[in-house]
Every structure is written in C-alpha cells, then in structure tokens.
Image (cartoon, rainbow, N blue to C red):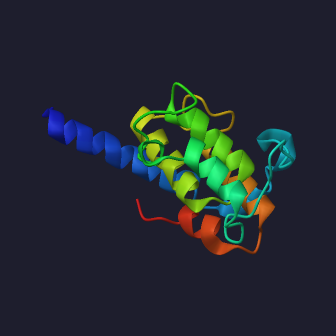
Amino acid sequence: MHYAFQKLTVRRLISLLVGCVFTNCVAFAQQGESSCGPLANAFGPFDYRTERGNSLYLVESTHFLPYIEAVIRGHTSTTAGGDIDYTLRAFPNHHRALLSTIKLGEKEQTTKPQGMRYTIDCWFDRAIRFRPRHHGAHDLCHLPA
C-alpha cells in the first residue's frame, strides 16, 4: 500500500473512531467520578468561559503554549499530554485543550495519550460534568470525522 494512502487511511480510521467514541456525549457524562476522577483539584477547577484573570494566564503561559496546543512537545512535561492534562484539570471546559486531546490521540493513535491520566472520552466527561449546560464540549463531541 502506498505510504501516503496508508497514512490517510489510518488518519481517517482514527477520525472515525474518535467520532464514534464521541457520538453519545450524554453517555460519557454518565461515566462520572468513579472512572474519570473527581473535578476537585489543587488549582481550580475554573470555568474557561468566564475566567480571564491571573488563573488562566498562569496555566496557559506555562502549560498551554502554542507548541503544546499543536501537540508538538511539552513544556513542564516530556510530552504535550502532561501539560494538556494539567490545563484540563485546572480548566475542565477549556475547549482548545479538549481539541488538543483529540489531536494528540490521533497523533499517538491511542485513546489515552502519553502523560495524560485519563482517556480522551474522560476529559469530555469531566468537561460536561463541570458545566453540563455549556455547549462547547458537546459541540466538540460532534465534530465531523
């Protein structure tokens, strides 16, 4: 099989898998604390939509730099996953970090990227549990493959 076609096929397969995994966001919100951990955190949790002060700056300036968002490498961690993990524990509904979990999962071809304590679907579960009426996490769940 031609390499470019094989790469495209693998990317499409992963996109379809991620799409299938995120098809039913309500089911993820039902996983809950037992499998996806509590929302309580030493720093946060804060609402990404409303927090525009020092807390957001502190987290993003250290744990969500542009190369982390692009899943190239980590800053305080050896992998981008470790820094994204921190960002999402502090801001569970950080939609850009949620999108980066999907990118990282595709890049690593896994549902639990290196350096992350939860699976991709658990990060969405946590975002939805944190702010059930916020549509950001719900909208990302339904991205076209």
Residue 92 visible to the viewer = no
- What residue is shown at x 77% (from left), y 67% (from top)? 131
Which percent across, then down, holds residue 143? 47, 65
Residue 104 position, x and y percent, is 47, 41
Q: Is 33 placed above or below 3 here?
A: below
Query: Which quadrant of the rendered structure holds the C terminus?
Result: bottom left
> Can you see residue 39?
yes
Query: Residue sitting at 59 percent across and 38 percent down?
Result: 83
* Nearer to the camera, 132 or 78: 78
| Up-down relation of residue 16 to residue 104 (above or below) | below
Instruction: Classify 77 as above or below 127.
Output: above
Give the side of residue 110 with respect to residue 4, left or right. Answer: right
Closest to the observer: 73 or 130?
73
- Residue furthest front in the image: 54
Residue 92 screen position, x and y as percent:
71, 55
Asked whether, in this view, residue 24 is left or right of residue 42, the answer is: left
Q: Residue at x 27, y 43 (%)?
A: 9
Write down the quadrant of residue 116 in the picture.
top right
Outermost residue toward the left?
2
Q: Quadrant of residue 82?
A: top right
Q: Is residue 79 left or right of residue 145?
A: right
How many numbered discs sit on the rendered protein?
0
The answer to which of 33 and 98 lies nearer the viewer is: 98
